Image (cartoon, rainbow, N blue to C red):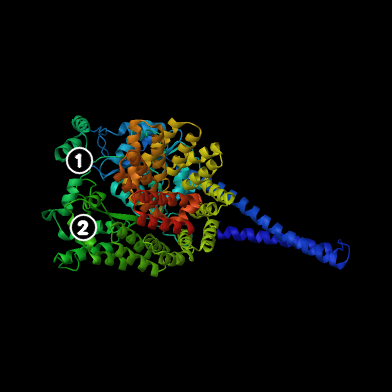
Amino acid sequence: MGEKRRSQWQIASVVAAGMCLLATAALFAADRVHGPTWVKIGAGVIVGVLAMLGKRAMEALGFRWAAAVEQLNRRSVTRGELLRQAPLVVDAGHQLALSIHPAIPLPETADSDLSGNLPEYIERRIDADIRAWIKGHTRSGGLIVLVGPATAGKTRSLYEALRTEVPDWLVPKVGTGAQLNAAVEDGVDLSQSVIWLDELQNFFADETLTASSVRQLILGRSGPVLLAATIRSEELDRLLHGSSPEDETTGPHVEQAIGYTHAQQVVKMLARWSPRSGTSERAIRFHVDSQLTRDELSRARALAEIDPRIASALAGSQDGRVTATLAGAPDLIERWTLETSGDPNGQALITAAVVARRCGYPEPIPRNVLESLAVLYLAEQSKAPQSTDWLPPALTWAIRPIEGRISALSEAITRPGVVDGFRVSDVLVQHSYGAGQGVVDHMLAREETWASLIEQVEPSIRTLIGVSAEWAGNTEMAQRAWRSAADDDDVQAMHWLGRIHTDGGDHQLGAAWFRRAAERGFLPSMTGLASCLHEQGDSAEAVTWLRQAADRGSTSAIVSLGLRMVGQGNLAEGERWYRQAAELEDARAMANLGYLLMQRGDLDEAEHWNRRGALLGHTGAIENLATICLRRGETDRALDWFRRGAEFALTKLEESPQSFQPWPGEAADDGISNVILGLAETLLERGESAETEEAEYWLRLIAERGDPRAAAALAARLSARGEAAGAHGWRQKAAESADSLLNRARAVLLDAYGLPGPQAHIDIILTHATSLDEEGNSVEAHAWRAKATLHSTA
C-alpha cells in the first residue's frame, strides 16, 4: 500500500476513533451515564478501548476497501495497456520480425511478393512436436521455451508454430517484466493471448518478471495464456549451473534487483521435451539445432528456387548452418576477427563489448566502459592508439552495417539524440565461447580486466560482475566484486557473500554477511541467516528471523517455517504455513503440504496440491503423486508418475549437478533422489527381468552421487546374488554417505521427516557394522558403531 493512501486511512481512522471518544464525553456531559463515579470512569475506559478497537477495525476495513478500489482502477488501466491495440498472432509477423536476427538483404531483382524482412521459412524437424505441444495447451496455457545457439532459428520456429496453431490469439506488447507482474496481480483476464518473451533472460533484468507471476500464468490464473520464449544455450547454462538466493527480491533496498533468482526458478520449472513427455508438461523446452538435418537441407534447396537469400545462404554455409549464414554470422565474425578486414581499433571495441558481456555487464554498455577495456586490450598487444581522438572513428567503423541492418555494434537510443550505450551482436558473444577465441578467454583470465570494470561501475553492476566471475570459476574476483559492492551498502552483494561462505561450510562468516543484509531488510538474507543459525543450533533466533521475513511476504521463509514446525512435531502450524505458501503458488510448499496430507490419509486433497506442484515441475510433487497411486493400488499409474519424475530429475542431474549433493540428501534436493529411489523400488517389487535391470540402473545413478539408501539397496541386491565383494563395496559407500549426510545435514533431515529421517541413515551405518562383524573385521565394525552412537545421541 502506498504511503499516501496509508496516511489517508490512518487519519480517517483516528478521526473515527476521536468521534467515538467525543460521543463518550457527550454522554457524560449530558449526564446520560448514571451511577457512582467509579462506574462512570469504568464505562469511559471501556468505551475508549472499544473506540480504539473500532479505529483498528475501520483502518483494516479501509485498507481492504481502498485496495479493492485501487485494484479495480489498475485492472482497467493494465488491460487497456496490454490488450487494446494488441495484434493477432497472424498479423504480428512484422512486429515479431524485429526480434528475429536481421537477414541478408533481398536482391532488388527478386520477386516482389517475397517479404523484405523474413526469408521463406524452412520447416524444421521439431516443428511438428512444438505445434503439438501448443495445440495441446490451448485450453490450459503454459510456458514454452526454445533453446539453442544464436541464429539457430529459435524465434522464427516459435512464431511459425504459433501462427499455425493459434492465429487468432492476441499478442499484447509487454515491454518489461513489471508490466506482466501488474497484470497478474490485478487479475487481468489474458485468455487466449500469447506473451512474447524473446530473449527470456532480459525480462529478469530491470523491472524483473517474478517467478510468482510466471507460476500463476502457468497454472491458468489469468486464463489460458501461452508464454512463448527463447533463450540462448549459454544463458540457460549460466542460470542452471549458477547458485542463487532462493527467494523473491522485493522491497526498498532492491530497486535494482538482479532478478537472477527469479530467472533460475523459472528455467528450473522447464521439462526437457521428449517423446514420452509429449504434451503433458505445462512448462516445456525444446532444443533447436544450428545445423540443418538432411531433410531440412532438402527443403531449403527447394525454397532456394524461390528465395535468392536462401540460395546465397546454402552456397555460403558450412556444416549445414544455413540459418546462421542467413543472419550474416560469417560476415560478422570476419569483421571482428580478420586482421585484414578493417580497423584494429574498431575490432578492439567489439572485443571490449564481448568481454564486458561475458563479465556480466548488462546492455547497453556505456562508451567509457568500451573505451577502457579496448585500451587495456590494445596496450597488452603493444598496439595502443597513437592518437587521442581514436575513439570516434573506431566506433563509426564498428557500428557500420555489414549488410542491410546487420552490424557488430549498434547504438542504444532511448531518448531523442542521446546514445545511452552500445549493444553487441549476440552472434559474436556466442562465438566467443567457442574454440579459437583465445583473445576473449585471455582477457577474462586477466585480473586487470575484472578490476577495470569493478572500479568504474555502480554497486549493483559490481554485484552482477561478481555473479559472472563465480560462473566463470573465478571465485576470488567474485568475492572482490561483492566486497566492493557491499562496502557501498549493496545488500545483494552482502547476500552473495553470505551464500558463498555458507556453501563453503563457513556458517559463521556466512551468517555475518547475511545478518548485514537482513538488518537492512533484504528478505532472502533473512532466510539465509535463519538457515545458518539453525545449523549452529540457535533455532530460536532462526525462527524469529523467519517470522519477520514471512510477515513481509517471503514465500521461502513461509515454507521454511513450515519445515521448522513440522520438524518440531507441530504439524498443525506446519500445515498452516505450507497452505499459506502453496496459495502463493510456491511449488515446494505444494509438495510439502501434499506430503503432510498424504501421511494423514487425505489422499484426494493431497493429490490436488501435488498435481499443482507437478505442473510447476517439482519432482517431489511428482513423487508424491506416484506414492498416492501406490496407496490406491494403481501400480501402473504409479510407474508412469515415477518415470516422468525420474526423467525430469535426470535432466536436472545432467544439466545442474549441484541440484543433487550428497550432504543435503533427500530432504533438500526437491525430490530428485526420492523419485528415482521410488521408481527403482517399484520396479524391483514387480520382479520382471527387464524392470529389475532398469531399477539397478537408476539406483546406481544416485548411489554414485552419494545417496546412502540407493547404495544400501544395491549392496542388498548384490549380496542376494552372492556377489560378496561388490556388496561390501556398496555397503561401505552407503555407510560413508550416511555418515557424511548426518554430519552436515542432520537438522535438515529432522525438519523434513522428524526422527525417522536421521534414523534411516543410522540404520545403514549399523547394517554395515554388522556385516563387518560377520566378515571378521570387528575393529572397523566397532568404529562404525561408535559413529552410529554419536549420531543417535546428537
Mark 2 and mark 1 lie on one chain; the one further toward the N terminus is 1
Position of the N terminus by quadrant = bottom right
Q: Where is residue 717? Give x, y as percent.
A: 35, 40
Compared to residue 683, the image places residue 556 above or below, namely below
Q: In the rendered structure, which amino acid carries the disc numbered 2?
A: Val
Asked if residue 420 can be seen in this view, the reply is no
Up-down: is 134 above or below 26?
A: above
Of residue 212 and residue 544, the one placed in the foreground of this image is 544
Q: Could you say which is closer to the camera, residue 723 or residue 700?
A: 723
Secondary structure at badge 2 equals helix
Residue 282 visible in the shown view: yes
Q: Residues within 10 Å of mark 1 (few under 14, many from 20)?
A: many
Residue assigned mark 1: 321
Kindly give the residue lying farthest to the left in the view shown. 340
Q: Which mark is residue 440?
A: 2
Question: Contact (CB < 8 A) between labels 2 and 1?
Answer: no
Residue 705 point in image, percent of width and height: 33, 49
Q: Residue at x 56, y 46 (%)?
A: 72
**In this picture, residue 718 sits left or right of residue 761:** left
